[in-house]
Each structure stands twice: as C-alpha cells, then as structure tokens.
Amino acid sequence: MSEQTITPTAPATAPAPRRALALPGFLNRSTLLRHLLLTVLAGVVLFLLTQQLDPFRNFQLATVAAYLCATAGLTLLVGMNGQLSLGHGALMAVGAYTVALTQNALADRGITGNQVLPLSLALGVLVTMAAGAVIGLAAARLRGPYLAGVTLAVAIAVPAATVTFDEVFNSEQGLSVAVEPPPLSLGLYFPNERWQAWVALCGALLTMLLLANLVRSRIGRNLRAVRDDEVAARLSGIHVARTQVLAFVVSAASAGLGGGLMALLAQSVSPGAFSLTLSLFLLMAVVIGGLGSLSGAVWGAILLVALPDLTHDTTTWVSLSPAVAQRLEGNLPLAVFGLTLIVVMIAAPGGVQGLLRRIGAGARRRAPAR
Amino acid sequence: MKALTRRGLSLATAAVLLTAVAACSEDANTPPAEVPGVTAGEIVIGSHMPLTGPAAAGYSEIAPASKAYFDYVNANGGVHGRKITYKFMDDGYNPANTQTVVRKLVLEDKVFAILNGLGTPTHTGVLDFLKTNRVPDLFVASGSRSWNQPDKYPGTFGFNTDYTVEGKILATHIKATHAGKKVCFMGQDDDFGRDSLVGVEQVLGAGAVVAKEKYVTSNQNVAPQIGALKAAGCEVVVLATVPGFTALSMGTAARLGFKPAWVVSNVGSDYLTLSKVLGAGKVLLEGMVGISNLPSPVDMSDPWTAAFKKIHDQYNGSAPFNGNTVYGMSVAYLFVQSLQAAGKDLTREGLLAAIEKGGFKGPGLAPFRYSKDNHAGYGGGKLTKVTAGNQEFFGPVYETDSAAGPVNEYKEERPAPTANTIPAAA
C-alpha cells in the first residue's frame, strides 16, 4: 500500500504480485475495478485538496494536471514502447489550437456555456489523434536518430504553420480562447482557478485511468514486447508496425487533451507557448520522473511546474544585485532542469519513481515481517 | 483481509467528514473585504516584462527605470504617505509565461494593479484574467488598439500612441513631402502591422499603398519581402517594425541596392537602439523619418530629460540612459499622477475613476485621451529625422484619433516639471 499513498493520482501500474497479497479478492481479480477505485479515491483526495489551496496553487495544480496528460502519453510511447518523440509539444499545440478554434467558433454562433467544453476537448483529442496517426505511420518505419529527426521536424513545422496560415491561426500573436466563467450554480464569487483545477483534474484522471488499463491489457503487453525485442515480438505473432502506430496515436491523443486543457487554462494559444523547448522539457520531465511507469509521469508533470517556481523564489530569496537577478530570472530554470536531469541520471537511473520504489523496497526488507 | 476492509471504511468515513467540513467553510459566496495590495504605508503593484528572450534588448531597461523613479518618490515620502513597491517579473515575451507570472502577481503577491505590462501578444492573453479579478490594468506598453475597449475591459488603459494614430501622422508627412511617389508598406504580422496599415491607408486612400509585405519575428530573413518591394518600384517605404527588423530591413535593402525613403513607426525608430544594432552600417539611418511623443534622451536642454537623467544617475546609475529609460520614467510619473488624483482613500474603483477623469500633463508632447469612453493612451506625436547621426524633432506636434478624424496640429505647450519632478497632489 505504501506506494499508493505516496502517489494518490497514479493508478497502480507496478507488477501485480506484490499488491496481490494486500488487496481483497475481488479487486485482485479485476484490473478495471481496482483502477476505478483508485481513480475515485484520488479524485476525492484531489477534490479536498482544491478546497484547501489558494487560487494560485490551484492554478498550478491545474497546470500540473494538463501537463500530466501529455507526460503520461509520452511515458507510454517512450517508456513502454521504446519510440522517441521530440514533437509532443507540437502535438499539444494541435490540441490547443483545435480547442481554441472550436470554442471561438461556437461562441461566434452564440453557443456558450461550460457544457461545450467536453465537445471541444473531444474534438481536440480527435484531431490530434489524426495528426498522431500520420506521424506514427512514418515513425513506424524509422529507428533511433531518424525517428528523433522526424519528430523534431514536427516540433518545428507546427509553429511555422501558424505563421503560414495566418488568416486562421493569427501568426505569432496567436488566438484568444473564449472561455466561460465557472457555472453560476457554484456561487457568484467561486474562484475561477478552483474551477479550472477541477476541469483539468477530470481530464488528467480520465487519461490516467484509461492509460493504466491499457498498459495492463493485452495491448500493453504487446507494446512492451515490441520495445524489448521486435524480432521476438514478431515471432509471437504481434504486428510490430501496427503496435507502434497505435502507441503513437494513443500518446498523441493524451498530448492533444493536455494541449486543449492548456488552451482553456491560459485562455489563449500562440506558437511561442508550444515551442521546441516545451517538447524537450516534456521528454526531460518523463525521464526525470521515471520512464518505467505512469507514476513517473506524475513526478515529471509536478517538476515541470514546480522547478521554475522554486528557482524564481530562490532568486528573490537570495539577495542578488538587480543586474545578476535579471540575467538569472529566465535562464536559471533551464539550468536547474538540466542539472536535475544529470543528477537524477547518475544517482537514480530509474528516475524519481524508480528511486522511491527502491527506498520502499529497502524499508520493507528492514521492517519485521508481520 | 478484514483489517484492510476496516481500514478502507475508516478512510472513506474520514474523507466524507472532510468534505462536509470543506463544504461548510465555503468561501464562494462572500466578496473579499479590503483593497488588495494597499496598506497605510505601502502600495504593491506588479508588471510582466521581457527581461530575457527575443524582445529583451532595450525593453528590459524599461521596468528598472520605472522602479528607479518610484524609489526616488519613496525617498521623498511616497504618495499620500504610501511607498510604492514595484514587482516586475520576466515572461521572456512568451504568452504562456505571462499567464503564470501575472497569476502569481495577482493571486499570490496580491498586487493592487498591473502597471505597464509589455507586449501585444503577451498582454492580450491576460486581459480576461485581469478583468475577472477586477485588477486595474494600467498603461499597457504597446500601441495596440485592444487596450481601448472600455465596455469590454473597463479596467484596461493604454499608454503608447496607438499604431493607427501613428500611421495617420506618418502618412500625412508622406502626402506633404513625397506627393506622387510610390508608397509601400512593410509590417509585423500582428495587430502592430495591421493597425499601422489601417492608419496609413486612412490618410492616403485604400489603393494608394502599392505593395504590402509582412514578417514574423521568428524568421530573420526578410530578403523575399524587401525584394518584392524593390520589384514593385517603391520609392517610399513605411515600416511598422520592431528595432531588430528595422535594422534588418534597411540592411537587406542596402545589399539589394534598394534605396527608398524610410518612414518608421515609433517603436522601431529609436536611433540609439538602431545604431547599436547596425554598428558601422548606421550610415543607412541617414534621412530616416520617425515619430515620437516623449522627449529625446540625448537632448539635455529638454527640462524633462534633464530631470529624469538626474533621478536616473542617482537610482539607476549602472544602466544606460536612453529612450527606454525616458519611457519607463514617464510611465511611472503618470502612475504617481493618477495615485495623487485618486486621493488618500485608495481603492481600485477610485483609481480607475481618477484616470477616466483625465487631464494629466507630463513629459509627453501630445495629450492623453483618457475619458469615460476612451481608454487609449497618447493621441499623437512629433516627427523625427536623422541628419548627420543626430535624431531631431521637426515640424509641429500632430494629434488625431484612431478612426476617420482629421490630423490636426496640437498647439498647447507641455508644462515644465515641478522642482522635485514629483507631480503635485490634487
């Protein structure tokens, strides 16, 4: 149980046998039930958390949730299927722009209100899935650095497309997104950030639930088999290319949802928000978090939000000359992120999640048997 | 296994109880009480600025200059006994970062107002957020017309002369001195370029601009656009460009052997900034016509420049003194003016009402347009020309509106700064 209490948002993904001893029989038999229960539990805990947090922390929580969709999808692709993507920031952009255009088009026709959110988010996911399928088809034929090259091209091409088709995407200035305030039934002074956190957390929990089930299913085993040895997988009757395309599509869908949620949170989309840097940050985050499991994606998403904030607080806390502080302001988070990556790779190659698991295992060994 | 079920049950019970407690302490129906960011001795305000990234060159010097002026005012007793604390945060000119830093300022640091947030794409994204939280959004550092929507964004006010007004005045100059010549336009592919073109065509007529080109800041190659302007036989080129792209356009044109008369909008025509970018190529700037509304940073005979330089040397000495410094101090001066006008009992509503009453006079050559139904900033400017490496004002001060109104000369003189360069209390 120790692992679940540490990461309440992460449905179980670790090997089953350990948990099999601790859970009641009916939960042990049904993966879906177990994951559903965990999701509901995580939902309750997070709901209580949003009640206690101040608006800014709620906004950060919402941002973590939006990032989590993307990092979870990326973990599935990189960690479970062994394909590399440097273009997930661009896939998020596809989702974000779709949501922005849908929301604005609906608002233009006088259809407003929060009930259209699921529709535009679903549309964002669908369009991103289509984009992911195209990239995935190409990716399934490529290996290693060539695959990285193609996805890198996507990361660069998508921002450029917003400039080329500036009538639709309004070039580098981007679009503002028509978003309704929280439903009035919640109260006139209901903090908008708490509402945003709820919306984003719903998306993130749904993503985690679906991905966790997928990972534990036959498809999940196929994904891992292809990652570990393509020839062996093919010999066991797995269609390698199809599995790889599927992984890319699922991963793209998650990224699209993450991007769509980002668009709703920021109430604006612009190519600058989905630059190559974001793609690289996402990849770094899942590596630092731990590639082996979806729980690692949670740590990655938290790091993406917490590190820039922490470094800003540190620079204001340490009194520096204004000139130095100004120079550090935007650049320090980059340096800290890189440094964290190096340290984590040396000290804990399994990422944060791997480290926690090792600590957990050590504690269990030392503890007297009950 | 039974123990586990029991543990699960107790956990669920605890969760339900907690929910009940949380629901009882619901704060969703009570409005907040006191004025955020204001105490008896302090006013906390914030801003988002490009301190790093593509727009940092030059623009990163604005906020420190404003802060220097506030420090000076604070050292002289503050405004109505309150010291001004100015927190400006870096957004790297990335709209996504602007979202985060402005939320941090408003929700966590609880600032009273956002002052002089810089950039059209960056600031557009936070308009709705600031409106929802009823935060005064004062003197935005951009000439987009978006800031002037009092019905939609009652708390937002512009500062710069808007790009359409600029375009109309530049076009008036072209009409007078380059009559019959082929006029072309090159602008940034956003509100900046579009608004400026609207102004130019307003005066010259819709079909008068022979060729129109646009650029984006992420692509440093402007040869195709400049080549097209050359092929169209342009004799006068209006540039709605940021400094880097003014320099790029002129440099590229020189390489292509294309020598039109350059007429450049305010943000892209500061000689000190351009000559630094161009280096030895600064001879290309000879004859360039620009527009400005604030005193020249090199003209120490201007009483405002001299007064600002004195404060700059004392509180911001390590930074260079240029157009950005004068700009930052002018914004800070206007903010202190509005605080003085809002009186001792400072509230957000009171401050907005004081600004809407208008009538502020300061370093600007043309007047502010603030009123109940106009939230645009300066309404005009004066033309500048580079001769023998000197950028100097010439001609009268022009004034106009952002619509179809005529371009008029503005005759009223600015007042001189007060003895201590702090606006008098109302």
Image (spheres, coloured by chain):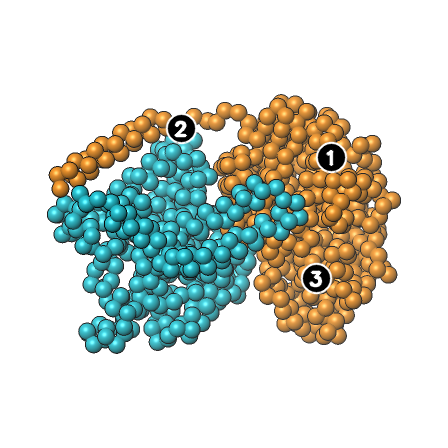
Chain colours: A cyan, B orange
Q: Residue at x 45, y 72 (%)?
A: A149
Which dot marks residue B9? Answer: none
Residue wearing tag 3 = B246
Read off the chain for label 2.
Answer: B
Q: Where's residue A73, x and y in %? A: 34, 58
Numbered disc 2: secondary structure: loop
Residue wearing tag 1 = B72
Residue wearing tag 2 = B27
| Foreground tag (1 vs 2) | 1
Q: Is residue A293 above or below residue A189?
A: below
From the viewer's perspective, is A104 left or right of A38?
right
Can the viewer see residue B421 in this picture?
yes
| Foreground tag (1 vs 3) | 1
- The mark nearer the N terminus, 1 or 3, is 1
Q: Is residue B352 above or below residue A306?
A: above
Image quarter (top left, top right, bottom left or bottom right) of the N terminus of chain A: top left
Label 3 to label 2: alpha-carbon separation: 52 Å
Can the viewer see residue B170 in this picture?
no
Residue B194, by quadrant, is bottom right
Q: In front: B5, or A75?
A: B5
